[in-house]
Image: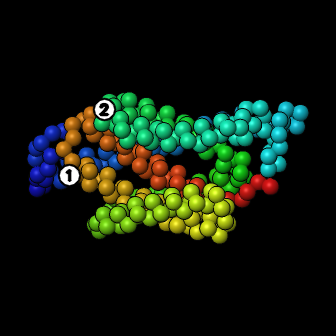
Amino acid sequence: MQPYQQNQYAGAGVKTAAEVDQGLRAFMLGVYNNMILGLAISALVALGVNMLATTSDASQAVVNFRGIGLTQFGYALYMSPLKWFVALAPLAFIFLFSFRMDKMSASAARGTFFAFAAVMGASLSTLLIVFTGASVVQVFFITAAAFGSLSLWGYTTNRSLSGMGSFLIMGLVGLILASLVNMFIGWAPLQFGISVIGVLIFAGLTAYDTQKLKEMYLYGNFDGEAAAKISVYGALQLYLDFINMFQFLLSLLGNRNN
Protein backbone atom coordinates (compact mmCIF):
# COMPACT_ATOMS: atom_id res chain seq x y z
CA MET A 1 0.00 0.00 0.00
CA GLN A 2 1.45 3.34 -1.02
CA PRO A 3 1.58 6.04 1.66
CA TYR A 4 -0.64 9.12 1.33
CA GLN A 5 1.22 12.30 2.22
CA GLN A 6 -1.42 14.56 3.75
CA ASN A 7 -2.09 16.46 6.97
CA GLN A 8 -5.20 14.99 8.54
CA TYR A 9 -7.23 15.42 11.72
CA ALA A 10 -4.86 13.43 13.83
CA GLY A 11 -2.09 15.85 12.86
CA ALA A 12 0.60 15.94 10.21
CA GLY A 13 1.91 12.63 9.06
CA VAL A 14 2.06 10.04 6.34
CA LYS A 15 -1.12 8.04 5.92
CA THR A 16 -1.87 5.18 3.63
CA ALA A 17 -4.72 5.51 1.15
CA ALA A 18 -6.72 3.01 3.20
CA GLU A 19 -6.31 5.10 6.37
CA VAL A 20 -7.35 8.25 4.55
CA ASP A 21 -10.38 6.50 3.06
CA GLN A 22 -11.39 5.12 6.46
CA GLY A 23 -11.01 8.54 8.08
CA LEU A 24 -13.06 10.18 5.33
CA ARG A 25 -15.87 7.66 5.72
CA ALA A 26 -15.91 8.21 9.49
CA PHE A 27 -16.00 11.98 9.01
CA MET A 28 -18.87 11.89 6.49
CA LEU A 29 -20.76 9.41 8.67
CA GLY A 30 -20.50 11.93 11.52
CA VAL A 31 -21.86 14.66 9.24
CA TYR A 32 -24.81 12.53 8.15
CA ASN A 33 -25.53 11.33 11.69
CA ASN A 34 -25.73 14.91 12.96
CA MET A 35 -27.91 15.89 10.01
CA ILE A 36 -30.30 12.96 10.50
CA LEU A 37 -30.58 13.72 14.22
CA GLY A 38 -31.38 17.34 13.30
CA LEU A 39 -34.08 16.22 10.86
CA ALA A 40 -35.53 13.85 13.47
CA ILE A 41 -35.68 16.64 16.05
CA SER A 42 -37.37 18.97 13.55
CA ALA A 43 -39.94 16.32 12.62
CA LEU A 44 -40.78 15.50 16.24
CA VAL A 45 -41.08 19.15 17.22
CA ALA A 46 -43.22 19.92 14.15
CA LEU A 47 -45.54 17.03 14.98
CA GLY A 48 -45.71 17.94 18.67
CA VAL A 49 -46.44 21.61 17.97
CA ASN A 50 -49.10 20.64 15.44
CA MET A 51 -50.80 18.37 17.97
CA LEU A 52 -50.90 21.22 20.50
CA ALA A 53 -52.01 23.78 17.91
CA THR A 54 -54.89 21.85 16.33
CA THR A 55 -57.99 20.10 17.59
CA SER A 56 -60.77 17.99 16.13
CA ASP A 57 -63.13 19.12 18.92
CA ALA A 58 -65.11 22.06 17.59
CA SER A 59 -65.85 23.26 21.13
CA GLN A 60 -62.12 23.74 21.78
CA ALA A 61 -61.35 25.44 18.47
CA VAL A 62 -60.77 29.19 18.65
CA VAL A 63 -60.84 29.59 14.89
CA ASN A 64 -61.19 27.37 11.83
CA PHE A 65 -58.35 27.64 9.29
CA ARG A 66 -58.41 25.64 6.04
CA GLY A 67 -60.89 23.27 7.61
CA ILE A 68 -58.65 22.70 10.65
CA GLY A 69 -59.60 23.83 14.14
CA LEU A 70 -56.91 25.84 15.91
CA THR A 71 -56.54 25.91 19.67
CA GLN A 72 -55.66 29.08 21.54
CA PHE A 73 -52.02 28.04 21.25
CA GLY A 74 -52.42 27.45 17.52
CA TYR A 75 -54.10 30.80 17.01
CA ALA A 76 -51.27 32.60 18.84
CA LEU A 77 -48.62 30.64 16.95
CA TYR A 78 -50.01 30.90 13.43
CA MET A 79 -52.27 33.96 13.30
CA SER A 80 -50.94 36.46 15.86
CA PRO A 81 -47.76 38.57 15.52
CA LEU A 82 -45.97 35.67 17.25
CA LYS A 83 -45.93 33.91 13.87
CA TRP A 84 -43.18 36.30 12.70
CA PHE A 85 -41.01 35.35 15.66
CA VAL A 86 -41.47 31.66 14.90
CA ALA A 87 -40.72 32.22 11.22
CA LEU A 88 -37.60 34.35 11.79
CA ALA A 89 -36.12 32.54 14.81
CA PRO A 90 -34.27 29.96 12.64
CA LEU A 91 -32.61 32.82 10.77
CA ALA A 92 -31.26 34.14 14.08
CA PHE A 93 -29.59 30.79 14.69
CA ILE A 94 -28.00 30.92 11.22
CA PHE A 95 -26.47 34.30 12.05
CA LEU A 96 -25.32 32.93 15.41
CA PHE A 97 -23.53 30.10 13.65
CA SER A 98 -21.98 32.49 11.13
CA PHE A 99 -20.51 34.84 13.72
CA ARG A 100 -19.83 32.53 16.68
CA MET A 101 -18.90 29.18 15.16
CA ASP A 102 -15.15 29.77 15.44
CA LYS A 103 -15.45 30.57 19.14
CA MET A 104 -17.74 27.66 20.03
CA SER A 105 -16.58 24.32 21.33
CA ALA A 106 -17.65 21.28 19.32
CA SER A 107 -20.23 20.32 21.96
CA ALA A 108 -21.65 23.86 22.03
CA ALA A 109 -21.87 23.91 18.23
CA ARG A 110 -23.69 20.59 18.24
CA GLY A 111 -26.09 21.76 20.95
CA THR A 112 -26.77 24.97 19.04
CA PHE A 113 -27.43 23.00 15.88
CA PHE A 114 -29.94 20.77 17.64
CA ALA A 115 -31.61 23.84 19.20
CA PHE A 116 -31.81 25.34 15.71
CA ALA A 117 -33.38 22.12 14.42
CA ALA A 118 -36.01 22.30 17.18
CA VAL A 119 -36.86 25.92 16.36
CA MET A 120 -36.98 25.05 12.66
CA GLY A 121 -39.38 22.24 13.52
CA ALA A 122 -41.74 24.72 15.18
CA SER A 123 -41.57 26.87 12.05
CA LEU A 124 -42.14 23.89 9.74
CA SER A 125 -45.23 22.86 11.72
CA THR A 126 -47.16 25.33 9.58
CA LEU A 127 -46.73 22.92 6.66
CA LEU A 128 -49.03 20.48 8.46
CA ILE A 129 -51.69 23.18 8.44
CA VAL A 130 -51.32 24.14 4.78
CA PHE A 131 -50.76 20.64 3.33
CA THR A 132 -52.31 17.27 4.04
CA GLY A 133 -50.30 15.01 6.31
CA ALA A 134 -50.17 12.26 3.68
CA SER A 135 -48.64 14.55 1.05
CA VAL A 136 -46.09 15.91 3.56
CA VAL A 137 -44.92 12.36 4.31
CA GLN A 138 -44.89 11.41 0.64
CA VAL A 139 -42.83 14.42 -0.41
CA PHE A 140 -40.47 13.90 2.53
CA PHE A 141 -39.57 10.44 1.24
CA ILE A 142 -39.23 11.75 -2.32
CA THR A 143 -36.85 14.39 -1.01
CA ALA A 144 -34.90 11.82 1.00
CA ALA A 145 -34.43 9.63 -2.08
CA ALA A 146 -33.36 12.58 -4.24
CA PHE A 147 -31.05 13.95 -1.56
CA GLY A 148 -29.38 10.58 -1.01
CA SER A 149 -28.74 10.12 -4.74
CA LEU A 150 -27.40 13.65 -5.23
CA SER A 151 -25.18 13.52 -2.16
CA LEU A 152 -23.78 10.15 -3.25
CA TRP A 153 -23.01 11.60 -6.69
CA GLY A 154 -21.29 14.61 -5.13
CA TYR A 155 -19.19 12.28 -2.98
CA THR A 156 -18.16 9.88 -5.74
CA THR A 157 -17.75 12.08 -8.82
CA ASN A 158 -14.25 13.02 -9.92
CA ARG A 159 -15.56 16.12 -11.64
CA SER A 160 -14.95 19.39 -9.80
CA LEU A 161 -18.24 21.09 -8.90
CA SER A 162 -16.66 24.38 -7.79
CA GLY A 163 -17.77 26.20 -10.95
CA MET A 164 -21.31 24.90 -10.59
CA GLY A 165 -21.26 25.99 -6.93
CA SER A 166 -20.50 29.60 -7.83
CA PHE A 167 -23.35 29.60 -10.35
CA LEU A 168 -25.74 28.07 -7.82
CA ILE A 169 -24.88 30.66 -5.16
CA MET A 170 -25.67 33.46 -7.63
CA GLY A 171 -28.91 31.68 -8.50
CA LEU A 172 -29.77 31.43 -4.79
CA VAL A 173 -29.39 35.18 -4.38
CA GLY A 174 -31.76 35.73 -7.31
CA LEU A 175 -34.18 33.19 -5.86
CA ILE A 176 -34.28 35.01 -2.51
CA LEU A 177 -34.93 38.36 -4.24
CA ALA A 178 -37.70 36.86 -6.39
CA SER A 179 -39.29 35.28 -3.30
CA LEU A 180 -39.27 38.62 -1.47
CA VAL A 181 -40.91 40.33 -4.45
CA ASN A 182 -43.58 37.64 -4.69
CA MET A 183 -44.40 38.05 -1.01
CA PHE A 184 -45.93 41.40 -1.99
CA ILE A 185 -47.42 40.64 -5.41
CA GLY A 186 -48.50 37.03 -4.78
CA TRP A 187 -48.37 36.00 -8.45
CA ALA A 188 -49.03 32.26 -8.79
CA PRO A 189 -46.99 31.70 -12.01
CA LEU A 190 -43.99 33.40 -10.40
CA GLN A 191 -44.36 31.21 -7.32
CA PHE A 192 -44.43 28.11 -9.51
CA GLY A 193 -41.26 29.24 -11.27
CA ILE A 194 -39.58 29.99 -7.92
CA SER A 195 -40.43 26.49 -6.68
CA VAL A 196 -39.06 24.77 -9.80
CA ILE A 197 -35.85 26.79 -9.76
CA GLY A 198 -35.55 26.32 -6.00
CA VAL A 199 -35.65 22.52 -6.37
CA LEU A 200 -32.93 22.66 -9.05
CA ILE A 201 -30.71 25.01 -7.04
CA PHE A 202 -30.83 22.98 -3.83
CA ALA A 203 -30.45 19.73 -5.73
CA GLY A 204 -27.21 21.13 -7.17
CA LEU A 205 -26.12 22.50 -3.80
CA THR A 206 -26.59 19.08 -2.21
CA ALA A 207 -23.99 17.57 -4.55
CA TYR A 208 -21.73 20.63 -4.34
CA ASP A 209 -21.76 20.83 -0.53
CA THR A 210 -21.09 17.09 -0.22
CA GLN A 211 -18.03 17.37 -2.45
CA LYS A 212 -16.89 20.49 -0.59
CA LEU A 213 -17.06 18.66 2.74
CA LYS A 214 -15.09 15.75 1.30
CA GLU A 215 -12.39 18.14 0.10
CA MET A 216 -12.32 19.95 3.44
CA TYR A 217 -11.41 16.65 5.07
CA LEU A 218 -8.84 15.64 2.47
CA TYR A 219 -7.03 18.98 2.29
CA GLY A 220 -7.71 20.40 5.73
CA ASN A 221 -5.38 20.36 8.69
CA PHE A 222 -7.68 20.13 11.71
CA ASP A 223 -7.26 18.72 15.18
CA GLY A 224 -9.98 16.58 16.74
CA GLU A 225 -11.95 19.51 18.16
CA ALA A 226 -11.89 21.44 14.89
CA ALA A 227 -12.87 18.33 12.96
CA ALA A 228 -15.88 17.82 15.22
CA LYS A 229 -16.98 21.42 14.63
CA ILE A 230 -16.57 21.01 10.87
CA SER A 231 -18.77 17.94 11.12
CA VAL A 232 -21.53 20.03 12.73
CA TYR A 233 -21.05 22.77 10.14
CA GLY A 234 -21.37 20.19 7.37
CA ALA A 235 -24.51 18.77 8.97
CA LEU A 236 -26.02 22.26 9.02
CA GLN A 237 -25.21 22.83 5.34
CA LEU A 238 -26.75 19.54 4.23
CA TYR A 239 -29.71 19.98 6.58
CA LEU A 240 -30.52 23.33 4.96
CA ASP A 241 -30.17 21.83 1.48
CA PHE A 242 -32.59 19.05 2.44
CA ILE A 243 -35.16 21.29 4.12
CA ASN A 244 -35.22 23.83 1.32
CA MET A 245 -35.50 21.17 -1.39
CA PHE A 246 -38.29 19.54 0.64
CA GLN A 247 -40.26 22.79 0.95
CA PHE A 248 -39.97 23.63 -2.75
CA LEU A 249 -40.98 20.09 -3.75
CA LEU A 250 -43.91 20.25 -1.34
CA SER A 251 -45.03 23.50 -2.97
CA LEU A 252 -45.03 21.69 -6.33
CA LEU A 253 -46.34 18.24 -5.37
CA GLY A 254 -48.18 18.67 -2.06
CA ASN A 255 -51.95 18.48 -1.70
CA ARG A 256 -53.27 21.52 0.13
CA ASN A 257 -55.97 21.46 2.78
CA ASN A 258 -59.20 23.12 1.70
> On screen, 91 above or below 200?
above
Q: Which residue is mark 1?
A: 219
Identify the residue at image location x=65%, y=53%. Answer: 136
Q: Position of residue 94 (x, y in %)?
A: 44, 42
Q: Quadrant of the N terminus?
A: bottom left
* Residue 161 at least partly seen: no
28 or 52, which lies in front? 52
Quadrant of res 113: top left
Q: How is the image coloured?
A: rainbow
Residue at screen point 26% across, 50% down: 216
Mark 2 lies on residue: 103
In the image: residue 107, left or right of residue 127: left
Task: Looking at the picture, tell me which residue is in the foreground, 142 or 63.
Answer: 63
Regarding mark 1 in the picture, which secondary structure is present there?
helix
Q: Position of residue 253 (x, y in %)?
A: 65, 63
Residue 136 shows in this picture? yes
**Residue 127, labelled with which disc?**
none
The residue type indicated by label 2 comes to: Lys
Residue depicted at 49% across the width and 33% down the height: 115
